[in-house]
């Protein structure tokens, strides 16, 4: 069913402007970018050319119907396990494609997170932090954009195919996401209404006026405002990067004839073009009713496209430098309710990583026999994000500032799961 | 069929897991039911339930009775059961991709002790002392004969959702999660015809006309994220060659252009009114003139009565507050029985669509879970329904 678009689906240029103008109007100026202590590191990391693709399963994909099956147990459900290309590792029969890519994956079967609702879970699994009114923590895409992105590029450093997440928070709007439409195309209102020459003249005039305005005022918001316009203008120079119909015609069979397939292919092409972080969203996993039919419907096209993405990245020589993260905001309950559904669950669930910086063919952690609790090697959201940042070459202790308050990238007390990292 | 103050006679415990299907085998006292673990049990009920005092009758649940046979072989959940009219042959379809044919009277391959009332024992033991608790929980189970299937039909490579049988028991239709439907000759155990619907849809319901010449299939595709996939279909087919006889959905939605049909999103608003979350149950009337189909899912479970000749919807029965699960006709063609997620079994008059009886109470009463399957005894005196809590309820229609 078609859902109404959200404001975030509209072009991010607007969001950038809004952020900039708010600050210009006298709002408390955060230290966007944490310029004091982390720019040097950002420059160093950028040299490594790391990328990240987040496959986001909105609603909460079931661990029991993917990577942590409990066949024969009361919590098991009707699906059966299949073997993979890694001896001893088994996954759900719904994932034959990923079963053959298991040697590229690290599966974490011992996630223990804190937020059981969608809103809180989406925030914490995008930022690694629990939501608090005092600090607007940046989401992972913004952090990767800052430390791995190329500010000189005409392409945005952080692209979402779909909407939602935590926002760039204290990093400032220049690291916020640029949202493509559901099919991976540019939003309709992203195109300039003017010929290039006229657009350039307008751009120069705007900069002139703003520079005059900035002479006696704080320069940061003005700079952000100008940057926002400049990036939106420059985006029009690379519109062809988003015209992927011909590419899709060639890749359709590999990725599967599905919208998620097209989104994954788009992510691969954007990473190839230099985008630091792409989030691909697959929605509607919140199966409080008809969980098994729901997963039977949604998982196969997703996993087929995911397997094709890994293959594609590898074939193009990008997989070693691209971390592919597969997760949603929550797991699902061991108990099957009387709607044949599974409810929200965060005591024990699964995520998976592949590609740059992480080992392949590894299953980390374990849940108990019914999947009720973590049996060993618990991984929290803080641990997961610290591990992801480390895999991308970013020190998770790196600080940015909320006003004068230093905020590390990953939650206090986190543990980098070194067993996962190469 | 005569309905006068229906009364529940039995409540058979089958608590291993969700009971998915129930059928009468020949008479009104032999019943088979299958569940999501792949178990099938057969009960031989005595003519009368054990005597109860008036006070007991008022306070207690209807009596249980132990099964006598277990049909072994399926390795995953049972989706459907069908029986020949003489009750000697039982056919089961499962999520293990197989159809199994059973001679219900075949010699037993062995015996086994089974516990089918575990939850009941746990409930009874809750307030007891530890000694009594131990005694209740470890009470001996029931001895059942185990029986193996006589034939296994293999032709599907996915979950078999649907199964239908002709009146003479000579033909069978089965449909799976790859949109494949197969018509089988039960005498030779060979395929007569097969066809595929749309890619990525599941054959959620299938039924054969009494003469076995016409088949109905209801398809539904949960893969909403796919391009160009019609999300649901309803069709009549020629069983001899698998050719399409009537595209019912096209007939029911004449204003929808063909190109719109291939877009799940824009088509959704049109077909959802007719098909809900797919037509998950279907049955031909014994005279073959009317087809009953029921909307599944968590929306309203409308039952459409369709004229088989023209394909037109004769009337729509509205009563189930949630999706329908099963539908069947009485053998005199006068009544349609339906069961649903709202925990009810409803009986409707075919002639005018009037609801004449509701055998259970809606959600909130003692029935907690969907009535997943309903069956009428060949002599039209008894009705059985299987619920997902693991109980098989048996009613006598005329008390």
Image (cartoon, coloured by chain):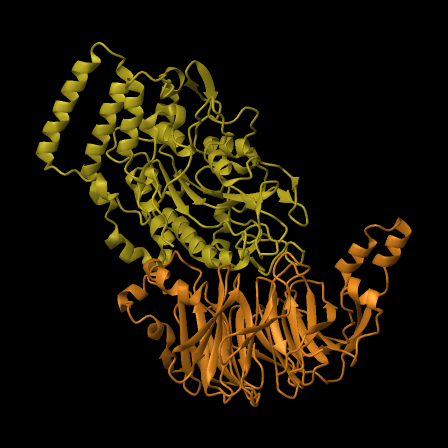
Chain colours: A yellow, B orange
Q: Residue furthest right?
A: B131
Indicate whether A56 appears above or below B140: above
**Residue visible at 18% across and 19% down in the picture:** A210
Can residue A313 be seen here? The reply is: yes
**Residue visible at 53% across and 34% down in the picture:** A381
In the image, residue B281 lies at what x, y percent? Answer: 51, 72
Can residue A93 be seen here? The reply is: no
Label count reads: 0
Residue nearest the viewer, comparing A73 with A97: A73
Q: Quadrant of the N terminus of chain B?
A: bottom right
Q: Quadrant of the C terminus of chain B?
A: bottom right
Residue nearest the viewer, comparing B286 with B186: B286
Q: Please indicate whether residue B72 sits to the left or right of residue B295 in the image.
A: right
In the image, residue A131 lies at what x, y percent? Answer: 49, 29
In the image, residue B174 lies at what x, y percent? Answer: 51, 77
In the image, residue A250 lies at what x, y percent? Answer: 28, 57
**Residue visible at 32% across and 64% down in the picture:** B262
Q: Quadrant of residue B95?
A: bottom right
Q: Please indicate whether residue B134 sits to the left or right of residue B352 in the image.
A: right
Q: Quadrant of residue B241?
A: bottom left
Q: Please indicate whether residue A276 sits to the left or right of residue A414 in the image.
A: left
Indicate whether A274 appears above or below B347: above
**Residue visible at 59% across and 61% down in the picture:** A78
């Amino acid at each position: 069913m078609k859902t109404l678009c959200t404001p975030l689906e509209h072009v991010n240029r607007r969001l950038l402007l809004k952020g900039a103008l708010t600050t210009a109007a006298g709002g408390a100026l955060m230290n966007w970018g944490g310029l004091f202590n982390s720019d040097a590191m950002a420059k160093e990391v950028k040299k490594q050319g790391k990328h990240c693709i987040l496959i986001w399963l909105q609603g909460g994909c079931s661990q029991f119907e993917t990577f942590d099956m409990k066949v024969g147990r009361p919590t098991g459900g009707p699906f059966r396990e299949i073997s993979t290309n890694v001896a001893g590792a088994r996954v759900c029969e719904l994932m034959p494609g990923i079963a053959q890519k298991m040697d590229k994956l690290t599966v974490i079967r011992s996630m223990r997170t804190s937020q059981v609702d969608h809103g809180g879970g989406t925030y914490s699994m995008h930022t690694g932090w629990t939501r608090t009114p005092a600090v607007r923590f940046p989401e992972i895409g913004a952090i990767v954009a800052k430390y791995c992105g190329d500010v000189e590029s005409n392409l945005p450093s952080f692209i979402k195919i779909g909407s939602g997440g935590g926002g760039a928070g204290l990093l400032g709007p220049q690291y916020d996401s640029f949202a493509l439409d559901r099919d991976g195309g540019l939003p309709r209102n992203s195109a300039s209404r003017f010929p290039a020459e006229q657009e350039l003249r307008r751009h120069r005039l705007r900069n002139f006026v703003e520079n005059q305005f900035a002479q006696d005022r704080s320069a940061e918001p003005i700079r952000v405002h100008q940057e926002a316009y400049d990036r939106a203008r420059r985006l029009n120079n690379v519109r062809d990067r988003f015209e992927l119909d011909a590419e899709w015609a060639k890749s359709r069979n590999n990725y599967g004839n599905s919208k998620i397939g097209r989104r994954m292919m788009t992510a691969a092409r954007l990473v190839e073009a230099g985008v630091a972080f792409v989030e691909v969203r697959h929605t509607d996993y919140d199966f409080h009713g008809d969980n098994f039919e729901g997963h039977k419907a949604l998982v196969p096209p997703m996993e087929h496209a995911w397997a094709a993405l890994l293959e594609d990245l590898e074939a193009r020589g990008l997989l070693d430098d691209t971390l592919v993260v597969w997760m949603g905001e929550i797991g699902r309950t061991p108990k099957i309710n009387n709607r044949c559904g599974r409810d929200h669950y965060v005591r024990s669930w699964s995520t998976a990583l592949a590609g740059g910086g992480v080992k392949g063919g590894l299953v980390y952690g374990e849940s108990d026999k019914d999947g009720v609790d973590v049996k060993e090697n618990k991984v929290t959201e803080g641990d997961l994000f610290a591990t992801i940042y480390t895999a991308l070459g970013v020190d998770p202790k790196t600080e940015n500032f909320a006003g004068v308050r230093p905020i590390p990238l990953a939650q206090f007390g986190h543990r980098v799961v070194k067993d996962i990292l190469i | 069929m005569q309905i006068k103050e229906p009364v529940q006679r039995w409540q058979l415990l089958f608590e291993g897991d969700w009971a998915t299907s129930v059928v009468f085998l020949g008479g009104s006292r032999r019943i088979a039911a299958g569940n999501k673990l792949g178990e099938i049990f057969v009960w031989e009920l005595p003519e009368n339930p054990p005597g109860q005092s008036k006070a007991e009758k008022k306070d207690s649940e209807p009596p249980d009775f132990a099964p006598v046979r277990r049909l072994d072989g399926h390795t995953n959940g049972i989706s459907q059961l069908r029986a020949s009219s003489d009750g000697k042959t039982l056919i089961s379809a499962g999520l293990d991709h197989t159809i199994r044919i059973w001679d219900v009277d075949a010699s037993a391959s062995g015996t086994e002790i089974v516990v089918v009332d575990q939850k009941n024992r746990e409930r009874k033991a809750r307030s007891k002392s530890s000694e009594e608790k131990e005694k209740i929980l470890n009470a001996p189970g029931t001895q059942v004969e185990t029986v193996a299937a006589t034939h296994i039909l293999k032709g599907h490579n996915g979950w078999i959702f649907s199964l239908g049988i002709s009146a003479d028991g000579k033909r069978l239709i089965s449909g799976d999660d790859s949109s494949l439907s197969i018509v089988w000759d039960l005498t030779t155990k060979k395929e007569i015809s097969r066809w595929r619907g749309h890619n990525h849809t599941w054959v959620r319901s299938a039924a054969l006309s009494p003469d076995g010449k016409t088949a109905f299939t209801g398809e539904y595709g949960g893969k909403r994220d796919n391009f160009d996939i019609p999300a649901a279909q309803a069709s009549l087919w020629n069983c001899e060659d698998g050719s399409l006889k009537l595209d019912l959905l096209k007939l029911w939605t004449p204003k929808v252009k063909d190109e719109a049909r291939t877009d799940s999103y824009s088509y959704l608003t049109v077909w959802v009114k007719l098909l809900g979350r797919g037509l998950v149950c279907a049955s031909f009337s014994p005279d073959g003139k009317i087809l009953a189909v029921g909307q599944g899912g968590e929306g309203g479970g409308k039952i459409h009565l369709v004229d088989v000749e023209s394909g037109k919807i004769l009337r729509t029965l509205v009563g189930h507050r949630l999706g329908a699960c099963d539908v069947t006709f009485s053998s005199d063609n006068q009544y349609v029985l339906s069961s649903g997620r709202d925990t009810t079994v409803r009986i409707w008059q075919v002639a005018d669509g009037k609801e004449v009886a509701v055998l259970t109470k809606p959600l909130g009463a003692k029935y907690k879970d969907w009535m997943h399957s309903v069956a009428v005894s060949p002599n039209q005196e008894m009705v059985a329904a299987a619920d997902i809590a693991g109980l098989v309820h048996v009613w006598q229609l005329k008390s």
